[in-house]
Image (spheres, rainbow, N blue to C red):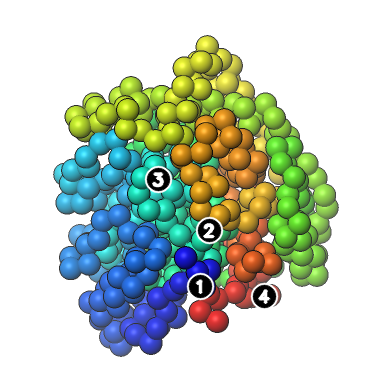
Amino acid sequence: MTDERAHGFTDDALGAHDAVALAALVRAGEVAPAELAAAAAARAARVDRMLTPVAHPSYDRPRLGPDGTDGPLYGVPTFLKDNVDLRGLPTGMGSEAFQARPARRNSRFTDQFLATGLAVLGKTRLPEFGLNASTEFATAQPVRNPWKPSHSAGASSGGSAALVAAGVVPIAHANDGGGSIRIPAACCGLVGLKPTRGRLVTNAQGGKLPIDLVTDGVLTRSVRDTAAFYAAAERHHRNPALPPLGLVEGPGQRRLRIGLVVDSPLATTDGPTRAAVEQTAARLEALGHHVEETTLPFGEEFSRDFVLYWGYIAFAIAVSGRLMLDRSFRINRLDGLTTGLRRLYQREFLHTPAVLRRLRGAEAAYAGLFRTHDVILSPVLAHAAPPIGHLSPNVAFDELIERLRRYVAFTPVNNVTGGPGIALPTGAAPSGLPIGVHLSAAHGQERLLLELAFELEADRPWRRIQD
């Protein structure tokens, strides 16, 4: 395996356009949705041989919603992650523990996603039940990073990230239960916004949990595509408990109080990541914002509690798999990470009430950060994407969970508290791998994050894989 970049950009109907530009071309009659779908299918066939991001292709039958022609992103090709239901395609959850069968109906989120006008060409791969931070499997081929195929594309939305970064589609579905929009965005040089809990319709799996960690969203190559998606999704459903978002089209005028966090109590940030965050802070200061160092009110206890709650999720999957997934489900086919998390929870389950109480209490501590700051700037991850194998589910569980804790040292706070966070590709490691920075804001303040993201993108456009 060479470490040359692997992408599908070429001179076809897709070109190097983002989703907003492609939708405009469709509306102007300059290109047909069928041409875009055919170009994306051809690109997918080329990159899938090396990166393996596609779980279930549907190239010959792009899926549109009943009112898709009215959507602002009508005709733009995309993919759904393989943990939401799309009628007629299996939902495999990245697992070898059961035989997935075609879904009988769409999930509620799928309907919201299709209402934007996007045309779904298939489903993307994720690690088993989205529990890992790398899209790797016990026996199957991993999803590889287009920037450096010997390395991870992140997870759990790794398949979607690989397709967007490689230029197959400009936008793809992702969801985030511990960082799974923002982690692959950071690994693959993309924009990834985890919205406030409740901004979009409730995720089918997350809504069943005692604390709903999971929010859906998208991965894109431009801030305006992310903003356009959320504006389009809001036309289908708007949560009246949150401030309306609308269409964000550029930087804001307000100068912000930004808290800078470089290290986590759980891990020491590596040199290239530290440099990317500090350089972003310097750029924000040059743009007129006030940046000062701060600390997060979450430490070792929060991390232990989150891991035990992750174990609860694995345990719930194991005991209910035959009922909730398929009668073919076999607990002995679960991978090493799911099995290790389940066993961890079985040993520690008596702590569940205290863990839930502390995790629910974290929301107040998170809100307190924004009494003195408008935005918190931090790394997404403690280091750049690791080599394939470093986070394999075949690594001994005790070592794997420690590697995950040291790597995923920032993002889970936003899942537990429900606050919004966005990953932006502002840095690069000496190896060429992207490095993402993370911006967090108070509940309902996605507009603030998008305006700041627009400002950073305009100040210094993101690197392009095809250059």
Seen from this angle, which residue lies furthest top? 350
- Disc number placed over residue 5 in the picture, else none: 1
Q: Is residue 429 left or right of residue 59?
A: right
- Camera-near label (4 vs 3) is 3
Q: Quick check: can you spot residue 133?
A: no
Residue occupying image coordinates x 58% and y 40%:
404
Residue indicated by mark 3: 137
Q: Is residue 386 left or right of residue 101?
A: right
* Alpha-carbon span between mark 1 and mark 2: 11 Å
Q: Earlier in the sequence, mark 1 or mark 3?
A: 1
Amino acid on which disc 3 is placed: Phe
Amino acid on which disc 4 is placed: Arg
Residue indicated by mark 2: 151
Counting other residues with Cα less than 10 Å from the Cα at mark 4, is it few (<14), some (14-19), or many (20 or more)? few
Q: Do labels 4 and 1 touch, CB within 8 Å?
A: no
Q: Position of residue 276 (x, y in %)?
A: 72, 62
Amino acid on which disc 1 is placed: Arg
Q: Position of residue 30 (x, y in %)?
A: 30, 88
Q: Do labels 1 and 3 touch, CB within 8 Å?
A: no
SS for dot 4 = loop
Q: Which is nearer the eye, 165 or 360?
A: 165
* Alpha-carbon span between mark 3 and mark 2: 14 Å
* Alpha-carbon span between mark 4 and mark 3: 37 Å
Image height of 446 relative to 403, above or below: below
The quadrant the C terminus occupies is: bottom right
Amino acid on which disc 2 is placed: His
